[in-house]
Image (cartoon, helix red, strand yellow):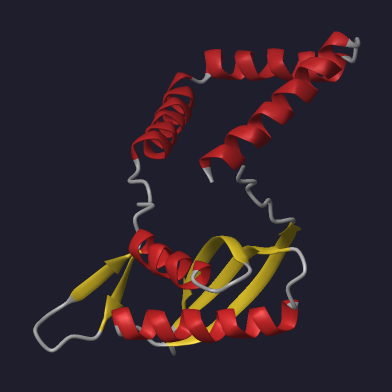
Amino acid sequence: MLAFTLGVLMVLGALWIFAMATGWGLPYALLIKGIDWLRWNPWDSLIVAVLLLLGGLLLLVRPRGTSNRTFRTPSSGGDVRISQEALEEIIARSATTLTGVMQVQSSLREREAGLQITVSCQYEQGVQIPQISKELKEKVKQDVELYTGIIVTEVKVLVRRLEKVHTARVR
């Protein structure tokens, strides 16, 4: 949100400067009137300055969202959470055990009924994509539920590319 706000302000500032540089008098006149208003209305100017200062500080100091998301798994002894990185590692190891799967990246979404997993992968050239994708979905769902206890509602597969396998020559 901060980046978007700063981006909008920068674009508006650039357009304002562009308008003044090309000889258009309205931005310049508005700037002069605004400065005069600030000079002749000190209490209003003070309120505007305080609001801008507080808004800027709020944007700079506000707590940032943590990138280390965790997912809750059912447990009788207390609360057990599994990090997003651990789940992604389980998914990657599960997927790369299948013949024909070379690289895997995953994204996770928590739903009310369970976890939705999207697996972006790279297959070896020559594999049957529907068959290997079906095996991949089943294997990822089975392994995540087995190792974590988290219910997986859906596994989506996105095939990013096919890669020709390079065989090593031995002399």
Give the side of residue 170 with respect to residue 144, left or right. right
Residue 114, image quadrant: bottom left
Of all residues, the one furthest to the left in this rendering is 77
* Residue in the image at 39% along x and 69% along y: 90
Residue 111 visible here = no
Residue situated in front as seen by the camera: 6 or 79: 79
Residue drawn at x 38%, y 39% is 58
Is residue 10 in view from this perspective?
Answer: yes
| 109 lies left or right of 31 | left
Query: Residue placed at 48% from the left, 69% from the top?
Result: 108
Rendered location of residue 154, percent (x, y): 54, 85
In the depicted view, which residue is nearer to us: 58 or 157? 157
* Displayed quadrant of residue 91: bottom left
- Is residue 169 shown above or below 45? below
Considering the image in quadrants, where does the C terminus appear?
A: top right
Measured as percent of width and height from the top left, residue 11 is found at: 72, 29
Identity of the residue drawn at 48% across and 79% down:
140
Which residue appears farthest toward the front when viewing the image?
171
Who is closer to the viewer here, 90 or 85?
90
Where's residue 66, x and y in %? 35, 52
Measured as percent of width and height from the top left, residue 80 is found at: 19, 75
